Image (cartoon, rainbow, N blue to C red):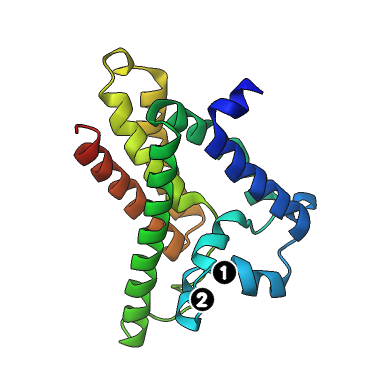
Amino acid sequence: MDWVVEHPFTTALFLVIFVVGIFTGTVLGHGIPASMQNTWGTGPQKIFEGKWWTIFTMVFFCNDAFMLYGVILAGVPILAMAESRLGTFTTMAVYWIVQLVIWLLVAVIFRFLMVRGIAPGPEVYPLTDIGLSVGLFGVIGVLVVALNRSPEAARHWQTIALEAGVPLYLVLKWILMPEWLADTGHWLALIIGLVIGLLFLSL
């Protein structure tokens, strides 16, 4: 119970994701029903169709059980670490700012490329995606800066794991399971998070 009280944002975010997983059936390995995904779970593309709320609700959906349990196992300890280090308000603010700004930016860029015929089309550059990862990578960027500015954490295993493990994951993800929209969003979010940390953690 103490852990829940100390990490309210982490608890609330992943609790909602798990409950949504129950309703969509992804907890049991099913895919998201097409009607539900179309209304609530599909991201940037729907902005151009007037469904602005999906830029928020897409965070709480997962494609399948593998994704659901993967984001819980990886996301909970990272977000909880950030919440402990940065505080609940800062973690929550960074998460949502990065999530919204990056997805809006990426959606507009990819739409611009496709309209101009520069990109091959949605088969290669899909304008839809779901999940919490973009905001999470933004938080990781800020967390890395915070850990490096803590004298006792200069060579701490958490710092080393994040600095080495996250870029390695992103490279392997791009090689083994390329998703142009998601991969672009992840890298941009990590960079923006680092910039936010460098600019504001010194204030």
Q: Nearer the viewer, residue 100 or 89?
A: 89
Can residue 114 be seen? yes
Residue 172 can be seen, yes or no: no
User: Residue 49: image x %, image y %?
Assistant: 50, 82
User: Could you tell me which residue is drawn at 44 percent across and 52 percent down?
Assistant: 134
Q: CA distance from mark 1 to mark 2?
A: 7 Å
Quadrant of the image for the N terminus? top right
Q: For mark 2, what is the residue?
A: 46
Q: Are marks 1 and 2 in contact (CB under 8 Å)?
A: yes
**Dot 1: element:** loop
Q: Of the residues shown, which amino acid type is indicated by label 1?
A: Thr
Please name the residue shown 63% across and 73% down the image: 39
Q: Which mark is residue 200?
A: none
According to the image, label 1 marks what residue?
42
Is 38 above or below relative to 129?
Answer: below
Placement of 114 over or under 166, stated as above or below: below
- The answer to whether residue 79 is left or right of residue 63 is left
Q: Position of residue 95 (x, y in %)?
A: 42, 47
Instruction: Using a 10 Å C-alpha cutoff, classify the residue at mark 2 as few (fewer than 14 neighbours), some (14 to 19) or many (20 or more).
Output: many
**Is 110 positioned to the left or the right of 78 in the image?**
left
User: The C terminus lies in which quarter of the figure?
Assistant: top left
Corner quadrant of residue 143: top left
What is the x, y in percent for residue 158?
A: 41, 23
- Of all residues shown, which one is farthest toward the bottom? 116
